[in-house]
Amino acid sequence: LAKTTQPISMDSYEGQEVNITCSHNNIATNDYITWYQQFPSQGPRFIIQGYKTKVTNEVASLFIPADRKSSTLSLPRVSLSDTAVYYCLVGDIQDAGKSTFGDGTTLTVKP
Amino acid sequence: NAGVTQTPKFRVLKTGQSMTLLCAQDMNHEYMYWYRQDPGMGLRLIHYSVGEGTTAKGEVPDGYNVSRLKKQNFLLGLESAAPSQTSVYFCATKTYLDKLEATNEKLFFGSGTQLSVL
């Protein structure tokens, strides 16, 4: 299983861009990278997923370098409501039980 | 369309008691999962199922049993609860995608069950 390493916590201010990096040095060829967001007392919610290069959707961008040993979740112009825990998962999405959650990054957005 | 529904939302048990947590989904997803989340930590996979009648062990299966008799339901059982099983339990579902269509495959989570074992 590919182990992931993320910063434990990050602080930001409203309106800033936030980049959260995840290291996954032993990522396998069939592994995808997926990010989830979790608010207190709720289950995690899917944010974005990618395999290589850059992926963008309506809420975030995901940057994956050519060696795929790390990935960066980018949140543009954060607001107070983006305060949450963000998890990076690496796993073969065709292998039902293989993806593992790490301890996540607690993002605190300040006014 | 309720998505993923977990019952109960809260439960307090005494050591040695048994209970069953129910996860029900109306999305017709093939895969279902049970996770536990301890304070300040990430989610750890207990058991999962890739289809009706099948189950498999995850990272932390000891002390738990599961059953998937119907596609829409996934039950998590604690036969003899221990204080170490105090946690928040989350159920999740995922649909199977063909490799060629494997984009944005995602887990859908329920709202969790807070379990305290005294």
Image (cartoon, coloured by chain):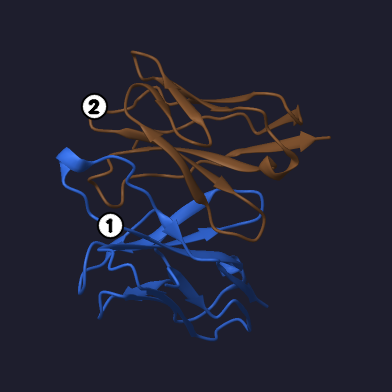
Chain colours: A brown, B blue
Q: Is residue A4 left or right of residue B102?
A: right
> B12 above or below A92?
below
Name the image quarter holding the C terminus of chain A.
top right
Q: Position of residue A99 (x, y in %)?
A: 36, 44
Residue closer to the observer: A73 or A100 = A73
* Circle 1: element type: loop
**Real-space Cα separation, disc 1 to disc 2, in angstroms:** 22 Å
> A68 above or below B37?
above
Quarter assignment of residue A89: top left
- Residue named by callout 2: A29
**Residue sitting at x 51%, y 41%:** A102
Circle 1 or circle 2, nearest the eye: 1
Circle 1/circle 2 CB separation < 8 Å: no
> A18 above or below B109?
above
Q: Residues within 10 Å of mark 2 (few under 14, many from 20)?
A: few
Q: Is residue A34 visible?
A: no
Name the image quarter holding the N terminus of chain A.
top left
- Residue named by callout 1: B95
* Circle 2: element type: loop
Q: Position of residue A40 (x, y in %)?
A: 67, 55
Q: Is residue B58 visible?
A: yes
The amino acid marked with disc number 1 is: Thr
Residue closer to the observer: A54 or A28 = A54
Quarter assignment of residue A33: top left
**Residue sitting at x 31%, y 52%:** A97
Check the image and name the residue furthest to the right.
A111
Q: Position of residue B61 (x, y in %)?
A: 39, 63
> B70 above or below B35?
below
Could you confirm whether marks 1 and 2 are on the same chain?
A: no
Q: Position of residue B90 (x, y in %)?
A: 50, 64
Chain where mark 1 sits: B
Q: How many marks?
A: 2
